[in-house]
Image: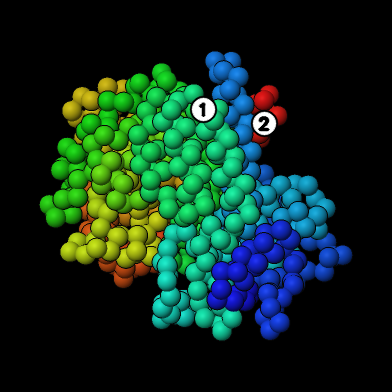
Amino acid sequence: MKILSKSYISAIALVVCTTMVSSCNKPVNENTQIQQASDISIDKKAKLSLIGVDENRLNIYFPVTLSADLSHLSANQKQMLAVLIEASVIMDDLFWQQAFDQDKQTFLSQIDDSKVQNFVEINYGPWDRLNGDLAFISDTHEKKLGAQFYPTDMTKEEFETSDFADKDGLYSMVRRDENGKLTAIPYSIYFAKELKSASQLLTKAATLAEDNKFADYLRLRAEALLTDNYQASDYAWMDMKTNPIELVYGPIETYEDQLFGYRAAFESYVLLKDLAWSERLSKYASFLPELQQGLPVEAKYKAQMPGANADLNAYDVIYYAGHSNAGSKTIAINLPNDEEVQLKKGTRRLQLKNAMQAKFDNILLPISKQLIVPQQRQHITFNAFFANTMFHEVAHGLGIKTVLDSDQTVRQALKEYASALEEGKADILGVYMVQQLLAKGVIDEGMLEDYYVTFMAGIFRSVRFGASSAHGKANMIRFNFFQEYQAFSRNEDGLYQVDMLNMAEAIDALSNKILTLQGDGDYDGVAKLVVDKGIIKAQLQQDLDKLTAADIPVDIDFKQGIKVLGL
């Protein structure tokens, strides 16, 4: 447990101490001793080993090299990419601190097996993110639901009954003051040393940027790292349309905070825009208001209209860092998360085409050969996978952001369940959108069966992410809901077949349920849905075991960096 004085001088002293060396134990003052937030007692001479899992578990990630053709970029742009990757490494280090309470290099040095070390690095700690966060390293405590965002000895009840500034804030770490009371310390203070370095790198990158709006965004993001005020940079990010290089950077998603879903984790993506694919996608954004009006739910749950100037673009990723690189890898992005910005400007949807293609080729197609009936396998297509993923991100902009008759956001009302339900909403409304746009002739590639069958195969892919993943939990709920509606059948050989009519009915029913739960801010209703349907039952587990026996990877792992790119 870290003990803090109430003054910012002591807080800053703590930050400098804890960020420079994890073993720092010099007192803040005569009466206050800094203690590391750790339940793990490790003898520095002892070696740590793999426990509780078969060594084959270490092979669940398929290696993918993130290379790219940079020949069309100028010398300044190439130099800027190197700076952005250098800045991304800082996000990587900060997320490790948010996820795990041990110094990375010290912890890895206690493991002899390089494959085990690599698995620790992929998971940003000793817990298997795709296996319910179970510990796979000896002498490891159970992962805290609140990761390192909260004191390790804090109970949920204590937090809920405490009153302190920025209690449910996105950008602060909760710690104890010198009297043992809970207090929130802004990221800009708690991680002051690292964020100052990151800010300087983004400022340097801005001087190399050839797109003025991208340069403006970089400068505003650099400032936000030092002030914890990210909204101005979110607006600037929304205004970027023509920049060939893209950066998503900072504390963004709240999935790592499984205790309340309040606090944002550090991450970064460095991307190159695919102009040809982006042109293909540009026509869809204008349909958002019309699609919002047609949602299968009462009018009051679709009255908050999304911004109509949102854009869709395709990218090749060249670097992932922090939360985005932990465990399962993101293949599409919908940002910003700020509800006010979303309502005024909409969102931007970034489709990560090279990562998507890697998952389709090495995971989804092999899964379909194991679990989908032969007569429907022809309907598993990359175009359908790409579209389902893309409209998942578009669908984050649909529905409702604020609880009806309240100023409370859905995220605040649903707490730790908000992320899983939001992912479930995006999945199901994404397919709803495909239905509507196919019927209108706006989508002119493939047939509805392509999208349904690919969507079904995608459930098997994502449910393997486990219950600790918001996406994994969402897919468990959907599988069990679809099963009740007989949206699919399973034959005696364990192969699944989509029922087109029942699938359409199930999509509408689940869309209605999720949108209503969100609009009502119904915490208890969502909790019941998760308990009842957010599980893998015995028969499904048996089928998933077939995928493991067939050595089908669960996800991908990136070989990336400045050297890989030849910079």
Image height of 298 relative to 564, above or below = below
- The disc at residue 562 is 2
Q: Amino acid at mark 1?
A: Ala
Image height of 350 relative to 124, above or below = above
Residue with the mark numbered 1:
209
Q: Position of residue 87 (x, y in %)?
A: 60, 41
Residue drawn where x is 15% and y is 43% of the image = 293
Image height of 211 relative to 116, above or below = above
Residue drawn where x is 49% and y is 38% of the image = 218
Q: Are marks 1 and 2 in contact (CB under 8 Å)?
A: no
From the image, which quarter does the C terminus lie in? top right
Of badges 1 and 2, the one in the foreground is 1
Image height of 114 relative to 238, above or below = below
- Residue 122 lies left or right of residue 424; in this view the side is right
Quick one: which residue is furthest to the left in this view? Answer: 299
Dot 2 falls on a residue whose secondary structure is: helix
From the image, which quarter does the N terminus lie in? bottom right
Q: Nearer the viewer, residue 244 or 278?
A: 244
Residue drawn where x is 38% and y is 31% of the image = 240
Residue drawn where x is 69% and y is 64% of the image = 17
Residue 338, visible in the rendered structure: yes
Dot 1 falls on a residue whose secondary structure is: loop
Measured Cα–Cα span from mark 1 to mark 2: 18 Å
Q: Amino acid at mark 2?
A: Ile
Q: Position of residue 201 (x, y in %)?
A: 59, 39
What sort of colour scheme is used for the picture? Answer: rainbow
When asked about the image quadrant of residue 254, the answer is bottom left
Q: Position of residue 557 (x, y in %)?
A: 62, 40
- Residue 151 lies left or right of residue 292; in this view the side is right
